[in-house]
Amino acid sequence: MVQSVSLKNKVQTVFHLNDIQEFVLSYFQLPNTNLTKNVEHILKSKHFTSYACIKRQWDDRGTGFVTCTTPIAPNTNHALIVKSEVDGSTLLDSKILLNTKYQKQQETLIVWSEGDKHDLALSFQEKAGCDDIWENICDVQGKDSSSFLNNSNLTSESNGSTIYESDDECAGESNDNYLPSTITLPPVDLSHLRDICDLFSPDKVRDASRRDLLARAIESGNYIRKLIDLFHICEDLENIESLHQIYEIIRSIFYLNKSSLFEILFSEEFIIDVIGCLEYDSQLNYNEKRNHREFLDTKATFREVIPIINQELLVKIHQTYRVQYIQDAILPAPSLFEENLLSTMNSFLFFNKVDIVTLLYEDPKFLSQLFSTLKDENLSDEKRKDLMLFLKEFCVFSQTLQQQNRDNFFQALATHGILNVIQVMLSLDDTTTKQAALDVFASIVECNPSTVREYMLQETQSTQDDDELLLNLVISEIQSDPDPELSGALNLMNYLKLLIDPENMMAVSISEKTEFLSFFYFRSMSVLLAPLMANTSDLKLARDDFHIAQLQNLILDFVTFCVEHHTYHMRNFLNKKDLLRRVLVLLKSKHQFLQLSALRFLRKIVGLKDEQYNLTIVRNNLFAPIVDAFKANKRRYNLLNSALIELFEFIRHYGKVTSSTTKLLEVAPRTRKVLESSSKVPESTDKVLESTEK
């Protein structure tokens, strides 16, 4: 007869994971003694399936009730049966074998292995239910179920430097082997410094369970304070060897990756001394010692551009700067095996920045004072620059906010006139101030482009001079970028695309969308194209140096985007300005990347199979520059040659289908002699010519 045990013991979830212990402890750096809490968190998370990227996946088998059954026939075993609370189906049927190694993790989790790579776990809602099933398992295996309770109740010794770890395996070993493992931290003095350093060696710190034990021992023993006191003694004695050892110890404490330890390390009481400990890198000679404390004390001056009354906020700002300095300038770049060991430090910085931004922008007096100062006409240039740099950093910190809070943040800035301030700053001569203003502009466009569009439309009603428009001031900065690679101009051009991208106007009414695009093409597009139009005014290149080629390449990329997304406005603008003819002049450039950009622009137009575009090409004989480029390229088998062949092939193929594309084939008779003069006419090009003759 089957006997049911603990029918009311509701199991929270049953799950399966290949190598569960290794995965959870190594990938997430979860301590062994806290496995229950962390595993439950992972399972409840909506994102647990995201870990499939490392070829290991949680399998949540559901929620139900567990029973421990007894055998009713010879050669059968006790078993753990879990029935679903939804439909009563069997979620788990696992035999309790004498050689199966079961573990009870803390109070509500039982884990075991079935085979080499098949691990199971039961996570209980209540401790009492877990205890009942645990006793049943241990009774079947003839083990003492109280060993877990005895071990788990052990605490640190009176000196606060010993921590016990419970080992709750109840299979395959005698009770004599169930002894608590301990980590005893040596006394903090010069004679034991080598022992402490060995205890915190990198290979030991990488072990997740040891990290937890070490962290608890450090906290309970007030160990960091003792290490700092010893550091001062060693520094006074100029004991370099001991200072190197303290450096290794403090660095290893960072890699324990515990928030409670970071709270101590980064406290106002200890953080400067911790930075001092990290000056004595054993890989450097004493003469090469980096004086981080001196730098922070004398060179990294804190300038309070707007008085901050909140002392808690001031402390947090100082702390965040110093922690960021430790991360960026002091700690060595983590190796492949250490890259996840500073995740808690990253979180510490992240939430500090969230607190700083939130406290600042929710203070109406602070924002009012900030913007009233920025708008003061008598403000010195140096003060204005400092305020803009602060505002830039303010926006960078805002990236830590959730999307809704970030929207509120930028809306608060817009309410105080941030875009008007940016417009004024871009008209100044100071490069640093203008760059900070452009960075703030980019942040606003990225988060809320509709706010920027709304401001620009309102601006047109009061500003008659196109040069004073905010959008044209930004375009002017793009065109005057001193960087040979135009990296800043490239970034700004991408933000302009965000502004005019119809996909970013989904929430805007059709009339508003049309109004903004009309404004852009009427008052800004000519400004954007001015360098290209000026350089091709006589249908030849006035300049062909690398810098102007890069700028024209950026412009071509932008107008190609416009051809694709703005059918009506771009088509009218192209015909009105004879833009395609000017663009094809760039095929004469010595820079092949610019030639390809010009060809790509034409290819995008032809690819639309638009009747009006094709008529423009045919009537104005705009295929002639393409043939000239083919002739100039001669016998070179390069990317330009391939792009030209692809263009011919496209026309040949779609010319059979659409009447508008067929009109392009009319150019072939005029160019056959040129193409045949080549030693080898491409097959696809020859087919284009044959199609025309037919």
Image (tube, helix red, strand yellow):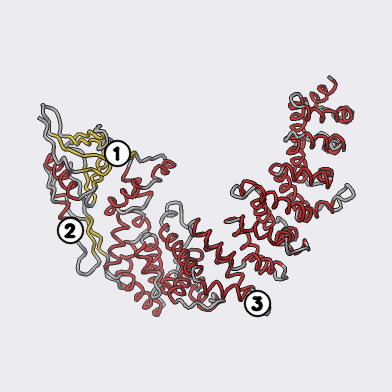
Identify the disc placed on residue 376: 3
Quadrant for the C terminus in the image? top right
Which residue carries the number 1 mark?
62
The answer to whether residue 632 is seen in the rendering is no
Label 2: how many Cα within 10 Å (few below 14, some 14–19, many 20+):
few
Q: Nearer the viewer, mark 2 or mark 3?
A: 3
User: In the displayed structure, does residue 273 sit left or right of residue 305?
Assistant: left
The reply to whether callout 2 and callout 3 are in contact (CB within 8 Å) is: no
Give percent across and percent down for residue 629.
83, 38
Query: Tag 1, which secondary structure?
Result: strand
> Relative to 184, is 50 on the left or the right?
right
Residue 660 x %, y %: 78, 30
Residue under the point 60% across and 72% down? 371
The residue that mark 2 highlights is: 153
Q: Say whether residue 487 is left or right of residue 316.
A: right
- Spot occupied by residue 221 in the image (x, y as percentages of width and height): 27, 69
Under circle 2, the secondary element is loop
Q: Residues within 10 Å of mark 3 (few under 14, many from 20)?
A: few
Q: Amino acid at mark 1?
A: Gly
Spatial CA distance of label 3 from label 1 is 64 Å
> Of callouts 1 and 2, which one flags the residue occurring earlier in the amino acid sequence?
1
Mark toward the start of the polypeptide (2 vs 3): 2
Would you place residue 261 above or below residue 14 in this image?
below
Task: First in sequence, mark 3 or 1: give its number.
Answer: 1
Q: How many marks?
A: 3
Element marked by disc 3: loop
Say what amino acid the circle numbered 3 marks.
Asp
Residue 162: which numbered mark, if any? Answer: none
- Residue at (15%, 51%) from the top-left corner? 147
Residue closer to the observer: 495 or 271: 495
Q: Are marks 3 and 1 in contact (CB under 8 Å)?
A: no
* Picture residue at 36% right of the left edge, 53% below the top: 29
